[in-house]
Image (cartoon, rainbow, N blue to C red):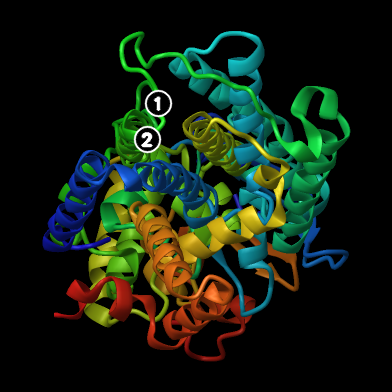
Amino acid sequence: MLLATDRSRERLIVGFLFALAFVVPWLMPSRALFIAETAGVALFALSLDLVLGYAGIVSLGHAAFFGVGAYAAGLFARFVMPDPLTGLAVGIVVAALAGLVCSLTILRGSDLTRIMVTLAVSLLLYELANRFDAITGGADGLQGMSMGPLLGRFEFDLQGQVPATYALVVLFLALLLVRRVVRSPLGATLLAVRDNPLRAAAVGIPVASRLAFAYVFGAALAGAAGALVAQTSGFVSLEVFSIERSADVLLMLVIGGAGWVYGGVLGAVAFKVLNELIAGITPQYWTFWMGLFLLAIGLLGRERILRPWTLW
Amino acid sequence: MTSSMPGSSTPRSASPERPLLAIDGLSAGYDAGVIIEDVGLRLGVGETLALLGRNGTGKTTLINTIVGTTVRHAGTIHLEGIPLHGLPSHRRAAAGVGWVPQERSIFRSLSVLENLTAVARAPRPGQPAWTPERVFEFFPRLAERRRNLGTQLSGGEQQMLAIGRALVLNPRLLLLDEPLEGLAPIIVEELLAAIGRITREEGLAAVIVEQHPQAILAISERALVLDQGRVVFAGAAGILREDPARLASLIGLSGSAA
């Protein structure tokens, strides 16, 4: 556990980032869509933190739930009704149900098995979305979704100021919720299970139901992230189920710090900002510099690069 | 009163017909191996049992089999008439088994307080309630360190936390696996007094495994000695307390039984 001064410093930095993110779309409208997308992937990274960082469930296919949320919200907007909040709720519920079904696969087996089955689920969904192109648009992506006004009042503008604010508010609320949960006794049981599942069970913690809870909760948040990205970009492509998306979110979480409530969000921000900066300079070779940055983190330690205040 | 027959109950038990803990014909081990064989015991409400024997005779295996982390080959375990042997570990804990493992196993990612709140359960009717706050009153050293990580504690403090973690389950039976091992003498005295208070004043039944028997026999009513996985003595603790020679021959401590 961190000391109180560390905690208030964390809160200050995260609060500052949020304030900046809320202001930027209105001062620099050209950055609004970038903010909206970053908020979406930050929520995605937060969801993986719950699953991997807190509950210790290794997943290489977390994009499955992101994609399910994205397609659910996208299809709902296109075929049922355009209200964003209802669409978000649909994305969350459908992804949570998918998580509930998949949780049966992660309760058995070791980390290696889990890597395999989580990967398999996202591959399956990818091909299903590809095959049923009459509904999903297949490789062309799901197009033609038009969003209604938020709360019946705020139109989704093309510049992305309303979508960015919407995504940030959802991320902020999700962060508060996750922080509340992981600091509760329930959150403590997740860490206990991660530390030592056998011992946790023997001192009275129902391990299977705790793992399932974390997985379903994580899937619901990933679904919310997918829904946000679909709604704010007005487009869903097969890429939402891709291995790259699962790998990227894993990188974000590792960069930010797994098992730390702000780790996912800060990692996502670092990842997206670096991506944007490097791609602006050398578009073809940005992954080279990203790789170099990851090596630096591996060798120097994340603490010294991203959390310099822990040094003094 | 002395008997090595598995399953025999003693008159000391408060209700011999319905003991708190009843183990019959228990054989268990790890994987296919058998470490304890045909073990039986009875423990009444509020009784303390000293579980003795030389190294590697199956004391920890017996404890772990009650908890449910071994492979059971045969036999039954009942707590207040509830068959524990078919239940997964966390349901056994819910049924009233509070385990203090040999290596303490404090959750290292959790603070002292979280180690307690993560497992705390509602008290049982008719039994004094153990809450994290009451554990802190009982072990003031822990109260000072409630925000520390579990791994930042000394060995004695970790042991207190492991006992506290078992107590907040509000168990019917406490299983203590070598609670004094590797601790400084002054901490040993403090812990012995605490364990004595828990079993005497709180009336909590306990099974205590120890390498050094005299300290534990002094606070136990019953004793069970294992040798090579089988029961070689079951009876009143007083018999062994007053007969060091017999104790020494049973647990193989040549001349250093005291």
Residue closest to the far bottom: B255
* Residue A127, horizontal then vertical, whole percent: 84, 41
Residue B149, above or below B257: above
As drawn, is B228 to the left or to the right of A154?
right
Identified by mark 2, the residue type is Gln
Disc 1 marks which residue? B124
As drawn, is A11 to the left or to the right of B46?
left
**Quarter where residue A285 is shown:** bottom right
Residue located 39% across and 44% down the image: A39
Residue B48 visible, this angle: no
- Tag 2 subunit: A
Q: Are marks 1 and 2 in contact (CB under 8 Å)?
A: no
Q: Which mark is residue B45?
A: none
Residue located 58% across and 34% down the image: A216
As drawn, is A54 to the left or to the right of B201?
right
* Residue B63, horizontal then vertical, whole percent: 60, 57
As drawn, is A284 to the left or to the right of B61?
left
Q: Crowding at label 1, few (<14), some or many (≥20) Cα neighbours within 10 Å?
A: some
- Between residue B162 and residue A310, name the one nearer to us: A310
Residue A235 visible, this angle: yes
Residue located 29% across and 58% down the image: B111
Disc 2 marks which residue? A159
State the quadrant of the N terminus of chain A. Answer: bottom left
